[in-house]
Image (spheres, rainbow, N blue to C red):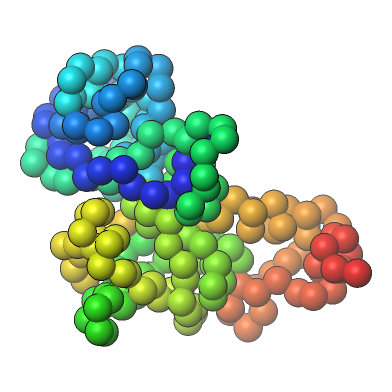
Amino acid sequence: MFTGLVEEVGRIARVEKRSQGAHIYVHAAVVTEGTRVGDSIAVDGACLTVVHVEPKLFAVDCMAETLATTTIGARRAGDTVNLERAMALGERLGGHLVLGHVDGVGEVRSVHRRGIALEVTVRFPADLAPYVAPKGSVAVDGISLTVTEVHDDEFGLGIIPHSLQHTTLGDVVAGRRVNLEADVLARYVRQALLAAGDAGRPSGGTGRLSMNGLRSAGYLE
């Protein structure tokens, strides 16, 4: 379990292609502290198991599915990646609950400067529509962010200077592919609606859940 608060930006040292997978080495100074073989680290939002660790370097194994369904498969030596160690019980949860299970790959459609922040628009896969809502949470390349608006198959983000300085969003450009993970709470609400007999279909293409469905599931009195 993660928080979506990036601890550091690491750099891919090398990628060794294996049969049906890859062995990836990552340079990192912070997340290697106290990390042991078998621990989990989120790499651009994908939860991966550490198989080798030494000062300022760790390695992970990626199976074929991970390479095919996330942006990890396109990573090369020299690329930067967002890194976060699994959270410990009792710590402050500054972001939101992130599982490190990538739901799909989106594409940055536009990037505009507004004041001190960047306004970024991301196109997302259609099957994520029921889980994306204005003011809701989403993990983008492992970063906990708040959705500012939703229009059809795109959502907006406002990126503050701190996030630009301490994550890979500092060099974000239109056309970049990003890993997306929906808020885990939205998953359970969706499942509760289905179990209650409400299909929970998007209303007018917005992905909003019905009030009757929420009442049936016991979320509203």
Image position of 60 (left or right of 17): right
Q: Nearer the viewer, residue 181 or 40?
A: 40
Q: Nearer the viewer, residue 102 or 139?
A: 139
Q: Nearer the viewer, residue 9 or 212?
A: 9
Q: Nearer the viewer, residue 64 or 182?
A: 182
Q: Is residue 163 above or below residue 211?
A: above
Q: Is residue 36 above or below residue 181?
A: above
Q: Residue at x 35, y 39 (%)?
A: 84
* Image quarter (top left, top right, bottom left or bottom right) of the C terminus: bottom right
Q: Is residue 104 something one can see in this rendering?
A: no
- Looking at the picture, how far across and down is residue 68, in whole percent? 33, 41
Q: Residue at x 19, y 33 (%)?
A: 28
Q: Is residue 55 something one can see in this rendering?
A: yes
Q: Is residue 44 above or below residue 27?
A: below
Q: Residue at x 47, y 46 (%)?
A: 3
- Looking at the picture, how far across and down is residue 215, in whole percent? 87, 68
Q: Residue at x 25, y 84 (%)?
A: 115
Q: Is residue 210 above or below residue 6?
A: below
Residue furthest to the left: 78
Image position of 220 (left or right of 76): right
- Looking at the picture, how far across and down is residue 205, in whole percent? 58, 79
- Looking at the picture, how far across and down is residue 173, in whole percent? 19, 68
Numbered label tally: 0
Image position of 105 (left or right of 205): left
Image position of 26 (left or right of 152): left
